[in-house]
Every structure is written in structure tokens, then in C-alpha cells.
Amino acid sequence: MRRVADADDGAESISSVVSGCSERRDSILAELDSALELTRELQKLIVFATRSDVLRTGTASFMRDHIRTLLVVSSANADKAIRLVSEERCSRGVSSELIKPSDGGLFNSLGDSIIQRVMQALDGEDLSRARQVCKRWSSFASDERLWKHLCLSVWRALESDSALWAVIDASIQLSDPARWRKIYPSVRWRKRWTCRLQKTGRFVCDLVAHQISGGPLGEKGLPSTLVVERRFNISHLQTFVLPEASVLYFEPAKDEDRAGYEEFIAYLLRRTRAGLALEDHRRFIFIPPCAYSKQLNYLGPSLLGVVQIAYPPLANQGPEG
């Protein structure tokens, strides 16, 4: 008899323990739990995604779903292979204690380039799960470049606006080498909307609005278009904004929106004004960098917003006497 031996790559393999059973064992493992077969399937996926015009320009959801399916099927096949080999050994009077699980199993046999491509196709939740597969995968899945990419795909301003980090999570230091991975949950699950910003009769830019504090906006969220029809002095914000108001952080939706975005901020600053848009009973206030934005714990150069219910409702206001 021989006990389980370590393979050259560090993964454990099941050695034959009874004369004449090695061929049967190898046949079972090759058929059901082949590292080479899994590698081939991953390579096929990469080739297909690289050559497909739709996948090259689309999201990675298809790849994530396919990888999940591969892992589920592979895990099921591995369990079946272990069960069959165990049954084979037991039928020959061999103790099942000789079968020992490996650290990472077939995952350790995958090449670095394959693992890196797999990680790049995962979202944050799956990347967190990948960190629990084995030590090697944990190292790849902890790569801050991956987490940075995920964060910026949701909130681009995190790369250029250092003051924004304190608003999202003041406990995370910019010097923390794992800051992108730590801030990802707070970034991923915040409400956000896209809207078109206009001044009366003129398009300004498309915006992405992220909620940073206050109560929920409800099912209506933000209107698809906000038209700034009025302005008022920013000195009135202290008394005008209600305590329960929702606070938003605005950023340009695309690079081509940045010029209009910055011009709008400059326009408000030159006049020391806040912008006001109205929709039914709601007021949308656009706040440039000022003393009031600092009271909201934001010290950066970007545009903030406040959403609140008009009180009393504008629709119920009668004519002035």
C-alpha cells in the first residue's frame, strides 16, 4: 500500500493503494475531474469573448454566468469522482481515511494568465468568493487593480476627487493599500441615477447622481430631465434646506459632459447662486462648492444636490392676496 502523495505542482493526487486499481482510478478522475478539461473550457470562453464583437463591447455578465456554470459543474464532477473512487476502494477493503482533500484542488493547476482573466470577468461578490477558494486565488482576487476597476465603473469621480472618500466612508484612509476593496461595498450598493441637466432652453450636460445621505427618493427617483429655472443666493441654503432632505453628489456621465458640467458650476459660483429645478411637489437644488457644502462634510470641487418636498406644496398655493 501507498498513501496519498504530493504531485510536482503541490496539488495532492490519489495514488493507487491496491494493486490493479490505478487504471480504474485514473479513468474516473480523467473522465469526471480533469484539470486539463476545465482549462480547455476556460480557454474556449476567452477565445470566444475575444472574437465576439458583441462581447467585446458589452458587459462581462455572460462570462460571469458561464464561469459560474463551469465551476458548479466541475465541483459536482469532482464530488462524484471522489465518491466513485472511495466506493472503489471500499469495495476492495481500503480505508477511506487514506483519501485526503487537496488545498485548492484543481484550481491550483490553472495557469496564472487563466486565473487573471477569470478574475477580470468577475463582479465584486464573485471576486470576494474567489478569495475564499484557496490561498493562490485569494492573492489574485485581492489585486487592488481589480477592485479599483469595479469601483470606477460605478463612480468615476473616486479617482480624481479625494474629498469624496470621506463622504462615502470616513474610516478609509487614502494611504490604505486595500482602500479600493474596502470602499467597494459602500460604492456598489448606493442609489444612483442618470439625468439630463438643462438651463431654460439650453442643454448643459448629462449627469450621474449618487445619493450620499438623507432619506430615500422613492420609486420615482430622479426625473430623466431637470431644468434649472430659478436661482437664489447660496446664503439662504442654511434656512431653506430641510433636515430630512436627500443629498446627492453629481458627476458628469461621460467625458464629453465635463465641459458643460464645469461651466455650470462656474456659472453658479460667479453669481454666488444655487440652482433650483421643480417637479410636482419636489424641489431639486444644485449647490456649488461653498460654506454650506462644507457643512455637509464635503470639501471638494464638485456639484452637490438636495432633493426635498416643497412645503407647503406648490400646487396648493393659492393666489397672493
Image: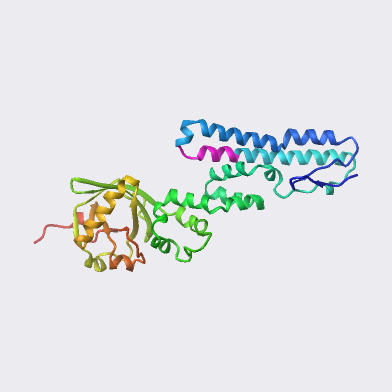
Instruction: Report if residue 56 is visible in the image.
Output: yes
- In the picture, measured across the screen, residue 313 lies left or right of residue 102, that is left
Q: Residue at x 60, y 38 (%)?
A: 69
Image location (x, y in percent) of residue 23: 84, 33
Image location (x, y in percent) of residue 81: 75, 38
Model colouring: rainbow
2 over 298 or under it: above or below:
above
Q: How many marks?
A: 0
Q: Which residues are magenta?
A: 58-68
Q: Residue at x 24, y 68 (%)?
A: 239
- In the picture, measured across the screen, residue 230 lies left or right of residue 252, that is left
> Picture quarter containing residue 169?
bottom left
Foreground pick, 298 / 222? 298
Q: Residue at x 20, y 46 (%)?
A: 202
The N terminus lies in which quarter of the figure?
top right
Foreground pick, 32 / 146? 146
The C terminus lies in which quarter of the figure?
bottom left
Examine the residues drawn in magenta and state their main secondary structure: helix
Q: Residue at x 34, y 60 (%)?
A: 247
Image location (x, y in percent) of residue 213: 38, 61
Instruction: Report if residue 131 is visible in the image.
Output: no
Image location (x, y in percent) of residue 68: 59, 41
Q: Is 60 inside the magenta-drawn segment?
A: yes
Q: Is 61 inside the magenta-drawn segment?
A: yes
> Picture quarter containing residue 64?
top right
Foreground pick, 116 / 84? 116
